[in-house]
Amino acid sequence: MGKMAKLVERESRKNDPQKTKEDILNIATEEFSAFGLSGARVDAIAEKTRTSKRMIYYYFGSKEGLYLAVLEKAYRKIRSLEADLELADLPPVEALRTLIASTFDHDEKNPDFVRLVSIENIHHASHMKRSSEIGELNLSIVRTIDEILDRGRREGVFRRDIDAIDLHMLISAFCFFRVSNRYTFGTIFHRELSEPNLYNRHKQMIADAVTAYVTCQPKL
């Protein structure tokens, strides 16, 4: 990069610190998801974003602070996608199926998110516990599911009294597993889980299974 280009870039970063932070977070997401917290290198993130370790520490405090900011950004993304679905305007069954489809597609398109969550589980969620934002963000999906379930029960289409967090776990488990275990599962059973026909079949299957569960009359 020439001297003039460097000056222009430096001036641009000075005038748009938010963009600089976003660039750092995007590259840091790739670095942490690929190498984990211990293996990721701040030097590599600085080089790829053409910034410096000093600037990264200025914005995020430390490597752990940057990692936590990456986690928070990942959760903001999925919760924002869910908010944009406007599920309150849909009939309960359609709202539930739309939410399931959104979760399924999100996890497929964002393997970095799946890897980051897996990495944080290795650390026993020790970093996540320091974030008040992540806790509040994830309350929103529980409230959304609770509202869908409540409407469904009042309208008589949902007959099972299921806890919203339990239902969230049921949906997440299937969508998350097929991404987190795609290589081991695919190797063992010789299946490419992203192959379009299989992808669409699994997407239909989880929506059908969850809908059938909440709409059927439980046995006494």
Image (tube, rainbow, N blue to C red):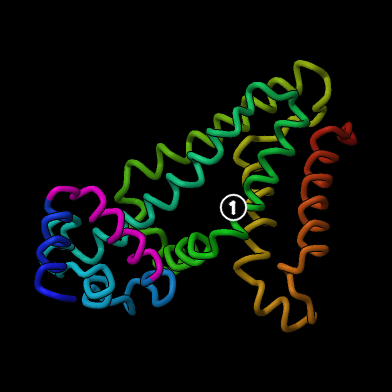
User: 138 or 40: which is nearer to us?
Assistant: 40
Is 13 left or right of 64, judged from the image as shown?
left
Residue on which disc 1 sits: 106
Residue pictured at 64% horizontal, 71% vertical: 181
Question: Taking 108 as reference, is 135 above or below it?
Answer: above
Task: Give the amino acid type for the residue marked by disc 1 in the picture.
Answer: His
Instruction: Tell me the quarter of the picture where residue 55 sits.
Output: bottom left
In the rendered structure, which segment of residues is drawn in magenta?
A: 15-30
Residue 34 lies, in percent from the top left, at 43, 75
Residue pictured at 79% horizontal, 80% vertical: 189
Q: In which quarter of the image is the C terminus?
A: top right
Q: What element carries label 1?
A: helix
Residue pictured at 71% horizontal, 76% vertical: 185
Q: Is residue 214 magenta?
A: no
Q: Quadrant of the N terminus?
A: bottom left
Residue 69 lies, in percent from the top left, at 31, 54
Instruction: Tell me the quarter of the picture where residue 147 sits.
Output: top right
Residue pictured at 75% horizontal, 16% vertical: 154
Is 169 left or right of 59, judged from the image as shown?
right
Is 172 left or right of 30, judged from the image as shown?
right
